[in-house]
Amino acid sequence: FEIELWGILDDLVVLQRQGLNRVLIQIDNLEVVKLIQESQSASVNSSLVRRVLQLLKQVGYWRIRQHVPREENRVADSLAKMASDKKKDVRIFEEVPEKLFHLLEFDIEKNAFVLY
């Protein structure tokens, strides 16, 4: 749960630095989706969620979509696991990591290509 929120925060920082002003967040954790959606109109105790919401307010347009089941999006799930195994550095891949090729093919076949 917290790892996925950190992932969203890190990605928003990268997007902001690149000057992008449209964000679509798709994530396989329904709790995170509900928390971000519901926190827009209520006060929230989590400083991590507050920071995510602050960055989203600076974006010209953003949307968060309902979750995609993990089994239908193996690439995003594998990337999330890879990120949790590393230090809290942001990693940007210029090319698909070799160990994800077969998962990417599966996700494309299932039409469930989601990155958060």
Image (tube, grey):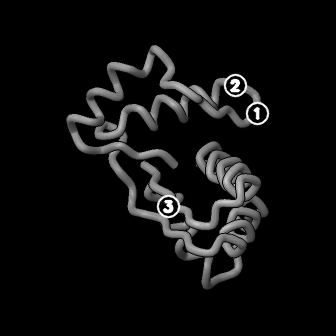
Residue 63 x/y as whole percent = 50, 69
Q: Which is nearer the eye, 58 or 26?
A: 58
Q: Is residue 22 left or right of residue 98?
A: right
Name which residue type carries label 2: Lys
Q: Give the residue at x 58% y 48%.
A: 1
Q: CA distance from mark 1 to mark 3?
A: 22 Å
Q: CA distance from mark 2 to mark 3?
A: 25 Å
Of callouts 2 and 3, the N-terminal one? 3
Q: Is residue 94 left or right of residue 30?
A: right
Q: Which residue is mark 1?
A: 89
Crowd class of label 1 (few under 14; some 14 to 19; many from 20; radius 10 Å) = few
Q: Give the residue at x 36% y 40%.
A: 70
Of callouts 1 and 3, the N-terminal one? 3
Residue 16 x/y as whole percent = 72, 58
Name which residue type carries label 3: Leu
- Contact between marks 2 and 1 (CB within 8 A): the answer is yes
Q: Residue furthest top?
A: 98
Residue 31 x/y as whole percent = 49, 59
Q: CA distance from mark 2 to mark 1?
A: 7 Å
Q: Which residue is mark 3?
A: 24
Depth check, mark 1 against mark 3: the one in front is 3
Label 1 sits on a secondary structure element that is loop
Q: Which residue is mark 2?
A: 86
